């Protein structure tokens, strides 16, 4: 299904609509009264109230059941659509958007970039709709390319938003274009002033092949996150960390992929791995299993790792649906996901040299070290390129007004127009 001018239509209409879309977009820019952030916020808040009042459970419950995540996790994320959360976001990111004087003769004002094409990732249902909401807050026309395997939640939310506030209809388009249909995506990209890309390096590299040089590329993710601990970390903190691993299945950019330990001692590292594995299993028993396909794939990988390890087999711990791999190197890497973590040594005096090479791939670190070392070590992580430094339990937490990967999206979806003020010629 697709969403055009507030109407849900079958995919069979898609190509014809895309072929004639550009004049329609220009007509909106030329003739339709611009939207403002407060209009969007009020509509989103009504939608948020409906979600928390269980009006969308017919879509949400099957989704969270298939992913084995708690209902309250979804509700905590839904707060992103609330009036208080969105107002704080606009205040933090755009400050005062009303015209202001640069000097006696010139004004400064935020304008929308114009037309945004959102190429969404499928790792978090609801994120594609939220990406469109961010574009709306900055006043843009938004074209959303759904990710493959979309659950239908995005169209459901955005069509409801238009029903609440019909003036948003000309500013929201949703198309179900397969990623292999490069010509169609390229056509949509030529319509856009900016292409918002949610995905990894491959997606961003591909985008540079089909996005015109005159069009701005705005990339988000994929990023790598991890935990960092020393010998002072408590079992309760590690259980909190394990809870986050099970909750997200490590699919978010903020999800912990592995744990660095502030040590250079191999035996200390192995002892910590066994300690965390025992706690990991305890916490995992509170959850349903990870998807069976992922479990099977990881089992094959782990058995292969065991065969390759030889006399180091004790470094691979798995059972009860979780796994821990104690590794000799310090390289930052993606885990096998779905409740698998690596554990590596990283003395704090090597943080910069090990992590700086990953620069734009870094996102969050869950940090637990002795209080007297906290400022020094957190500063090293910030210098290395990390943009979120949290407690172990909070790596995947969401705060109203926080940045995306160290940047404010509403600013990237806007431009500053400076305009001369005509002199007053009245007598």
Image (tube, rainbow, N blue to C red):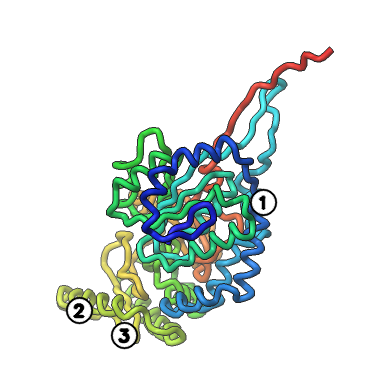
Q: Where is residue 319 in the image (x, y as percent from the top left)?
A: 31, 85
Q: Residue at x 41, y 61 (%)?
A: 10
Q: In this view, does 80 lie above or below 184?
A: below
Label 2 belongs to which residue? 303
- The tag earlier along the polypeptide, 3 or 1, is 1
Label 1 belongs to which residue? 39
Query: Label 3 to label 2, Cα distance in Å?
Result: 12 Å
Dots 3, 1 in contact, CB < 8 A: no
Q: Nearer the viewer, mark 3 or mark 1?
A: 1
Closer to the camera in the image, 281 or 190: 190
Q: What element carries label 2?
A: helix
> Looking at the figure, which quarter contains the C terminus?
top right
Could you classify mark 1 by the number of other residues whose Cα lies within 10 Å: few (under 14), some (14-19), or many (20 or more)?
A: some
Query: From this viewpoint, is residue 9 visible?
Result: yes
Q: Where is residue 102 in the image (x, y as percent from the top left)?
A: 67, 27
Could you classify mark 3 by the number of other residues whose Cα lies within 10 Å: few (under 14), some (14-19), or many (20 or more)?
A: few
Label 3 belongs to which residue? 319
Res 147 quadrant in image: bottom left
């Amino acid at each position: 299904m697709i969403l055009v001018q507030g109407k849900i239509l079958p995919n069979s209409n898609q190509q014809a609509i895309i072929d004639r879309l550009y004049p329609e977009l220009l007509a909106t820019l030329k003739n339709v009264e611009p939207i403002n952030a407060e209009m969007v916020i009020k509509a989103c808040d009504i939608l948020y109230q409906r979600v928390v009042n269980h009006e969308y459970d017919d879509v949400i419950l099957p989704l969270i059941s298939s992913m084995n995540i708690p209902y309250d996790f979804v509700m905590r994320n839904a707060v992103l659509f609330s009036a208080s959360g969105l107002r704080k976001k606009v205040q933090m990111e755009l400050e005062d958007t009303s015209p202001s004087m640069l000097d006696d003769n010139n004004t400064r004002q935020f304008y929308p970039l114009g037309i945004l094409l959102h190429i969404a990732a499928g790792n978090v249902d609801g994120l594609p709709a939220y990406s469109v909401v961010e574009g709306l807050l900055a006043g843009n026309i938004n074209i959303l390319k759904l990710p493959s395997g979309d659950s239908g939640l995005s169209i459901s939310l955005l069509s409801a938003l238009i029903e609440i506030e019909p003036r948003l209809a000309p500013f929201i388009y949703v198309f179900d274009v397969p990623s292999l249909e490069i010509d169609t995506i390229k056509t949509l990209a030529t319509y856009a002033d900016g292409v918002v890309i949610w995905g990894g390096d491959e997606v961003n590299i591909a985008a540079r092949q089909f996005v015109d040089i005159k069009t701005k590329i705005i990339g988000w993710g994929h990023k790598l996150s991890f935990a960092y601990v020393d010998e002072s970390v408590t079992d309760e903190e590690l259980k909190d960390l394990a809870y986050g691993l099970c909750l997200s299945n490590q699919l978010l950019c903020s999800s912990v992929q592995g744990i660095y330990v502030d040590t250079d001692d191999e035996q200390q590292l192995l002892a910590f791995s066994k300690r965390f594995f025992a706690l990991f299993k305890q916490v995992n028993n509170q959850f349903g299993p990870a998807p069976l396909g992922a479990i099977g794939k990881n089992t094959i990988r782990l058995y292969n790792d065991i065969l390759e390890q030889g006399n180091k087999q004790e470094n691979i711990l798995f059972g009860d649906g979780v796994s821990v791999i104690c590794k000799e190197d310090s390289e930052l890497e993606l885990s096998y996901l779905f409740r698998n973590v690596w554990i590596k040594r990283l003395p704090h005096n090597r943080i910069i040299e090990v992590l700086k090479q990953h620069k734009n791939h870094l996102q969050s670190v869950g940090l637990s070290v002795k209080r007297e070392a906290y400022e020094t070590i957190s500063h090293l992580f910030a210098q290395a390129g990390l943009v979120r430094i949290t407690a172990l339990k909070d790596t995947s937490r969401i705060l109203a007004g926080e940045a995306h990967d160290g940047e404010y999206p509403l600013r990237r979806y806007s431009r500053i127009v400076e305009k001369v003020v005509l002199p007053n010629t009245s007598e």
